[in-house]
Image: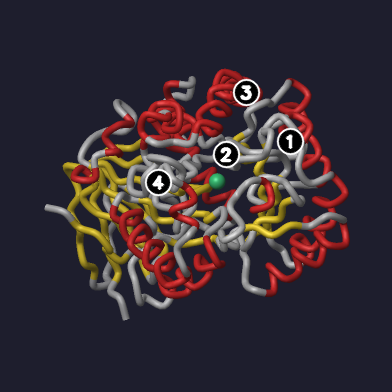
Amino acid sequence: MIPMRKIKAGRLIDGTGGMHTDIEILIDDGEIVEVAPDIQTDADVEVLDFSSYTVMPGLVDAHLHITSTGDPDLLKNLRQGVPYTTLVGAVQAKKTLQAGITAVRDAGAGFRTALDLKRAVGEGLHPGPRMMVSGQGLSITGGHGDPASGWPPEIEFRGRRTVDSPDEARKAAREELAAGADCIKLIATGGVMSMGTDHTTRGLTEEEMRAAIEEAENRKKRTLAHAQATKGIKNAIRAGIDSIEHGFWLDDEAVEMMVENDVYLVPTLAAVYHIIEAGTDEGVPPHAVEKAKIGRDAHISSFERALKAGVKIAMGTDAGTPFNRHGQNAFELELMVDAGMTPMQAVAASTSVGAELLDIQAGQIREGYLADMLVVDGDPLEDVTCLQDVESIKAVMVEGEVKVQRS
Ligand SMILES: [Zn+2]
């Protein structure tokens, strides 16, 4: 039986736009039961004094690839077998948690290994964040992620599978759900990293996506669409998708459709940033650099348009793409602020909004929510970059248990 805990916070950011100073948080059985200036209780409580720090919800990264390393040579990554892939995922899950990220959505891992990793973390075998795992993503033959679109034939990544009709999409979604997927990823357009695809064209058709989405909804699971080109974005929204990932080319109509249908945007600005910043000099494949450059300006304008229109934006890094390293997830907040968010909005996108998208009762310091929290030496509302320095993350708690502590 874990004792009740009382946390003294010098500054509290609640995850939904509220900030308070000198406040206390009472935690019982992994859950926040009270937030007030001076909590009195007869019960035995363990007091954790963080009165010189900021306490906030743990970060939620709504889009990453836990078994990809950030090596620019994607194929090197994909050539590994199952044991190596799993070990890489385990190491990166630990790094992620140590950096203050308490929940993630894995958007595609080799060999479905993220499902086992989630189980290992859940059973306490290995440290890591709470995980929502998409199984193998669904793509069209020759589409983004299909080895036939340009990967050497020996590549056995199995992070994606191809479907070429609504019936095939339905069956594939059922199989992924049966394998334990928490969400279904649909490839609605071409992508940056794949060799033979054009990211300005669509992938799965609306009908194919609708069939897969129906199956996910039937199992009360969510769906996400890799979607860069406008046509694919709109196909996914009309098919009933829950979130648009990347969203390079969002026109006014797409933004309006997202607001109307309560569709989230997960921009993954860091992915594009690192590919362009490192470039071919650092070994990023030329096709990826070129496509990232083609999309960059539109991507930033789309982000601004979505933000202005009130689209729900959840933080997602796409960590695992070139030089986009696990443990450096908080860099995305800086990019979102650079693109027009206030620090408070960036924090909300990275906590409450992300948790809502992942459908977990976390991301807020509020009664009834899971006590997934981080303690940082600094004020993210003054300067969001303080979250990037792992040494500034003084403690990370999952369900009230201190998983990481730094003096
Ligand atoms: Zn991704």
Q: Please, what secondary structure does the residue beneath circle 4 have? A: loop
User: Residue beneath label 1, please?
Assistant: 233
Q: Residue furthest left?
A: 407
Nearer mark to the viewer, of 1 and 4: 4
Q: Element under label 3?
A: helix
Mark 2 packing: few (<14 Cα in 10 Å), some, or many (20+)?
A: many
Q: CA distance from mark 1 to mark 4?
A: 26 Å
**Foreground label between 2 and 1:** 1
Numbered mark located on residue 70 in the image: 4
Residue highlighted by disc 3: 302
Q: Reading the chain from its start, which is encountered first: label 2 or label 3? A: 2
Identity of the amino acid at label 4? Answer: Gly
Q: Is residue 231 left or right of residue 317?
A: right
When the figure is inspected, residue 103 is found, relative to residue 17, above or below; the finding is: below
Where residue 53 appears, as percent x and y from the top left, is 21, 42
Residue found at x 67% / y 26%:
249
Q: Earlier in the sequence, mark 2 or mark 4?
A: 4
- Mark 4–mark 3 CB contact (< 8 Å): no
Count numbered badges in the picture: 4
Where, by quadrant of the figure, is residue 166 drawn?
bottom right
Question: Residue sitting at 72 percent across and 71 percent down?
Answer: 175
Q: Earlier in the sequence, mark 1 or mark 4?
A: 4
Residue 323: image tag: none
